[in-house]
Amino acid sequence: MSNVAASAGYTLGDRTVKRLGYGAMQLAGPGVFGPPRDREAALAVLRAAVEAGVDHIDTSDFYGPHITNALIREALSPYPETLTIVTKIGARRGPDGSWLPAFAPAELAEAVHDNLRNLGLDVLDVVNLRIMFDVHGPAEGSIEAPLAALAELQHQGKVRHIGLSNVTARQVAEGRAICPIVCVQNQYNVAHRADDALIDALAAERIAYVPFFPLGGFNPLQSSTLSEVAKQLDATPMQVALAWLLQRSPNILLIPGTSSVAHLRENLAAASLRLPDDALAALDRIGAQAAQD
């Protein structure tokens, strides 16, 4: 566990961002599909995040699709110079809201241009290539062809920096041989710790790791230990889970999502929550138990 202050920044591409950012996925409708239930509330959350000092927003044009980027543009454009917007490509949505692979070169080019248009940008700060060999998690296979196509878009000046999402350690190594990789975005939380070794390896190379589903996502964590630690620290389970991630390694950047301003403020407060050693030990046992199950 790192003792670095959670409030300290970390390198993302050519910028230093605060370690606790904001993920826009929940601004779309149910199942990340269609418009939000409350459009004005969605706009308010985005504005409140930036007003609170958030300088790293994660999004994608396949959220909605095209919903979250349009909301971000309406709420925040013209963008503050300090704001880094990270998007991802490699998937598309079916008419029923299903998640489908979309990493042929033409599909990737179309996705980059969709993101540029809907965000109202001339160049994208960071684009994560989401690998879709398996929709539900990383699966081995060469990523050379889609990553080379994205690197060409970077060469054309449409993309500043490239990251990877839903990838294995082997694919990260393959990717770094093709072009510089500034971040990796995979599922990781106090119970889902398959990427422990990858996080440490990336930290040694000063590459950011951005975990999604810090509380389990579509299948929320059920942990009495997490709830007990939260009660002892007068915090919420989400705050404890976020604080654990911030103390796990200095290269971890967080993008918790919410459609509520009150929940946003709760999440941001996790940056100042320090977990004592006994709490860290208890939380680490959650991951050890999950690995045995």
Image: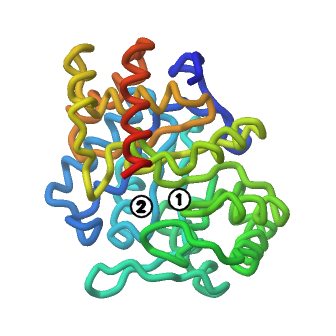
Q: What residue is shown at x 47% (from left), y 39% (from top)?
A: 254
Q: Is residue 11 above or below residue 198?
A: above
Quadrant containing the N terminus is: top right
Between 169 and 82, the one nearer to me in the picture: 169
Q: What residue is shown at x 14% (from left), y 59% (from top)?
A: 37
| Sooner in the amino-acid sequence: mark 1 or mark 2 | 2
Query: Can you give x and y, in whole percent of width and height, for residue 45 in the image?
Result: 28, 41
Give the image quarter of residue 112.
Answer: bottom right
Q: How is the image coloured?
A: rainbow
Q: In the image, is 236 to the left or to the right of 164?
A: left
Q: Is residue 258 above or below residue 114?
A: above
Disc number lying in front (1 or 2): 1
Residue 77 visible in image: no
- The residue that label 1 is drawn on is 87
Mark 1: amino acid: Thr
Q: What residue is shown at x 26% (from left), y 29% (from top)?
A: 225
Query: Can you give x and y, in whole percent of width and height, for residue 93 in the image?
Result: 38, 80
Circle 1 packing at 10 Å, graded few (<14), some (14-19), many (20+), is: many
Circle 2 packing at 10 Å, graded few (<14), some (14-19), many (20+), is: many
Instruction: Identify the mark at residue 69; answer none if there is no mark.
Output: 2
Q: Is residue 51 above or below residue 216?
A: above
Query: Can you give x and y, in whole percent of width and height, for residue 234 in the image?
Result: 22, 15
